[in-house]
Image (cartoon, grey):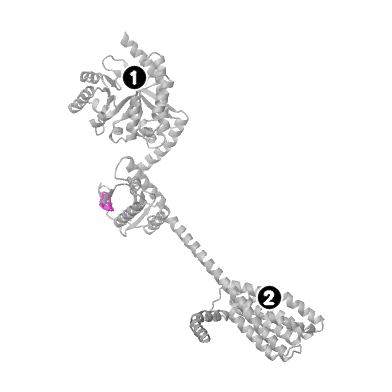
């Protein structure tokens, strides 16, 4: 019963083991195995065999010739020089590898058969025949290694050995050759399997490296999030398009698009929803250009696209809206989000490069952003302005560092007594190369860059220091200093103004901080806090250019304002324009009833001063009293003006 169970177990186990046994036999005899080594590696193996075999065979050939075994020595010499040496050189050609391999194996087989037959000294040549299976598998591989080993074994059957073997000894010798053949085949199989495993690992690593390299090559010209061409990619596509369109009469339009407040929106909704949002924006852009052009992404909130438009009418203010729509409507869950944009447009009309066109489109976008328009079409004049703007930036930075700026002062005069009550500090700049540069040019440059902060520090320090000097000279005046909306983001602003005034012993109530009306219309909580801190420290807060913006009483009610400055555009025509007269008189009346001081700008003539005085305005400022003056000239003027009124 146990024997029956064992037999049954073996019969059940055999079908499961047979595939493995069959695979091992197939691999051992090289039936289905493919050679892993390439032709170069095979050539190296053949040359290695020749490199070892040449000196060894030559040595024993000489040894046998000098030892009296002439026939054996001659066979070895012939085999070396007719087969082994040519095989070394033939192995350098991939087409002649099989011939080189055959020559090596024929040489090895011939020498080993000769050793078996002639024996050499004391028949010791027989010992060398067991090396042939190892050489055959190393040189010829698994499949042909068996062929050469089998051929050698057949030759041994028909060749008489030099040593007189008994029948049992000859059988053991031949069996030993077969056994060493199996051992050599097994060792070679292990080598082949190791090479195959190593080859697979190298292929896997190479595949990973190739995939990584392909990814890097893709990202070099494409955006990772959207897959759209990046700056390098879109420049290449645009260059190709320009090459195709040489001599074409159609109009190629390049649009540089900047999304408005998209970064803040993504920070609110998160990265995942931001990716969905960008996918919809890309779909909208690609839908707008269709197959007429290409879309690329240049930055987090910047896109570029170009297309052909044969009947483009740039004079139509709504043409871009007709292409893109007023904004992108995107869905985030159940919510509809409208994405606004500002765009720069460049129309290709001459032979220029893609990089130049892209730069022009970007300049047009920056111009549109500066003037708060939906889009702007590039032209050469704007290019010059843009270049001058950037040139001015470098010059202004140097002017601040090298103290080339100067502060001028325009008097503010009591309309009833004619005495100066203070002055507005106005920056002036005389460039050593260009000469005087108007504030209308360099002030926007400072406000649109980080220069506004060192510029404002200089203005505050200069104006307060000059006020301290006037007070030491006996002039009881105040000074008004203009601040930009960006200055209100400076967390150290209040401390700097307070510290400067305290160090120079200037009372805070003698310093007026002028802010344009636009600052109050869209004011943040942080800016509101800064204004309140200045007011709490005793500094006067003035609304400059009142009436030029969307005037509202809400910010006057909600913020600590001390003074209104009526803009000169209303004041200068109060004698000719009834509407301007009504606006000015009602503004003065409202301000006085709210307990605010009023300063009228643009007082050019005596009768305007008289009319303002009749309206109840106390202080005026304009060319009727004086143009802006240097600090020294203003001091002399103020001394004389005060002396005249006293007399």
Give coordinates of residue 176: x percent, y percent: 68, 84
Left or right: residue 284 versus residue 632 is left
Which range of residues does the magenta coloring cover? 320-334
Camera-nearest label, 1 or 2: 2
Choose top left, top right, bottom left or bottom right for residue 646: top left
Q: Earlier in the sequence, mark 1 or mark 2?
A: 2
Residue nearest the observer in this picture, 60 or 26:
26
In the image as oriented, which residue stretches furthest toward the front?
Answer: 1
The quarter in which the C terminus is drawn is: top left
Residue 189: in sight, yes or no? yes
Q: Residue at x 55, y 70 (%)?
A: 197
The answer to which of 597 and 466 lies nearer the viewer is 597
Residue 516 % position (x, y): 31, 30
The answer for how far apart the CA atoms under marks 1 and 2 are is 106 Å
The residue carrying mark 1 is 422
Find disc 2 in the rendering and name its residue: 50
Q: Residue 41, position in %: x, y?
A: 60, 72
Residue that appears at 30% across and 35% down? 523
Q: How far across and how far down the image is residue 137, in percent?
A: 62, 78
């Amino acid at each position: 019963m146990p024997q029956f169970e064992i037999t049954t177990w073996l019969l059940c186990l055999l079908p499961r083991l047979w595939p493995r046994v069959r695979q091992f036999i197939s691999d051992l005899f090289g039936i289905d195995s493919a050679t892993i080594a390439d032709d170069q590696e095979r050539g190296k193996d053949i040359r290695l065999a020749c490199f070892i075999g040449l000196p060894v065979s030559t040595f024993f050939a000489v040894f046998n010739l000098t030892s009296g075994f002439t026939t054996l020595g001659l066979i070895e010499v012939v085999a070396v020089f007719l087969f082994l040496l040519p095989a070394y050189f033939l192995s350098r050609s991939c087409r002649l590898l099989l011939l080189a391999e055959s020559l090596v194996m024929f040489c090895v087989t011939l020498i080993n058969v000769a050793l078996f037959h002639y024996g050499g000294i004391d028949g010791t040549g027989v010992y060398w025949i067991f090396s042939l299976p190892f050489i055959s598998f190393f040189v010829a591989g698994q499949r042909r290694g068996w062929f050469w080993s089998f051929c050698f074994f057949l030759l041994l059957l028909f060749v008489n050995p030099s040593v007189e073997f008994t029948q049992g000894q000859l059988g053991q010798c031949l069996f030993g050759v077969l056994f060493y053949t199996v051992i050599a085949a097994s060792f070679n199989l292990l080598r082949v399997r190791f090479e195959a495993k190593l080859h697979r690992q190298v292929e896997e690593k190479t595949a990973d490296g190739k995939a990584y390299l392909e990814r890097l090559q893709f990202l070099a010209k494409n955006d990772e999030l959207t897959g759209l061409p990046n700056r390098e990619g879109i420049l290449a596509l645009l260059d190709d398009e320009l090459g195709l369109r040489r001599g074409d009469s159609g109009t190629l339009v390049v649009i540089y698009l900047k999304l408005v407040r998209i970064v803040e929106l993504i920070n609110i909704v998160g990265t995942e929803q931001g990716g969905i949002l960008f996918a919809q924006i890309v779909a909208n852009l690609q839908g707008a250009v269709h197959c007429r052009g290409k879309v690329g992404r240049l930055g987090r909130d910047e896109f570029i696209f170009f297309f052909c438009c044969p009947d483009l009418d740039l004079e139509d203010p709504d043409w871009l809206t007709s292409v893109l729509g007023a904004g992108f409507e995107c869905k985030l869950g159940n919510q509809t989000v409208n994405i606004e944009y500002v765009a720069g447009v460049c129309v290709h009309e001459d032979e220029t490069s893609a990089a130049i066109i892209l730069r022009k489109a970007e300049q047009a976008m920056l111009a549109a952003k500066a003037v708060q328009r939906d889009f702007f079409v590039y032209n050469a004049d704007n290019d010059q302005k843009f270049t001058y703007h950037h040139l001015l930036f470098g010059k202004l930075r140097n002017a601040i560092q090298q103290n080339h700026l100067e502060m001028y002062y325009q008097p503010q005069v009591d309309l009833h007594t004619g005495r100066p009550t203070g002055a507005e500090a106005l920056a002036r700049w005389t460039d050593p190369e260009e000469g005087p540069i108007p504030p209308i040019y360099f002030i926007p440059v400072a406000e649109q860059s980080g220069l506004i902060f060192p510029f404002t520090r200089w203005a505050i320090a200069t104006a307060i220091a000059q006020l301290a000097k006037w007070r030491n000279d006996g002039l009881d005046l105040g000074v008004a200093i203009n601040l930009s909306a960006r200055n209100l983001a400076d967390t150290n602003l209040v401390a700097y103004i307070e510290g400067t005034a305290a160090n120079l012993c200037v009372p805070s109530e003698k310093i007026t901080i002028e802010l344009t009306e636009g600052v109050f219309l869209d004011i943040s909580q942080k800016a509101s806090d800064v204004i309140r801190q200045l007011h709490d420290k005793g500094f006067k807060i003035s609304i400059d250019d009142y009436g030029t913006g969307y005037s509202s009483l809400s910010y006057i009610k909600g913020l600590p304002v001390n003074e209104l400055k009526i803009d000169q555009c209303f004041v200068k025509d109060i004698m000719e324009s009834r509407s301007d007269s009504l606006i000015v008189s009602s503004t003065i009346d409202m301000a006085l009833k709210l307990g605010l001081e009023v300063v009228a700008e643009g007082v050019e003539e005596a009768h305007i001063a008289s009319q303002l005085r009749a309206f109840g305005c106390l202080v005026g400022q304009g060319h009727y009293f004086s143009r802006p003056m240097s600090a020294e000239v203003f001091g002399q003027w103020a001394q004389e003006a005060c002396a005249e009124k006293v007399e």
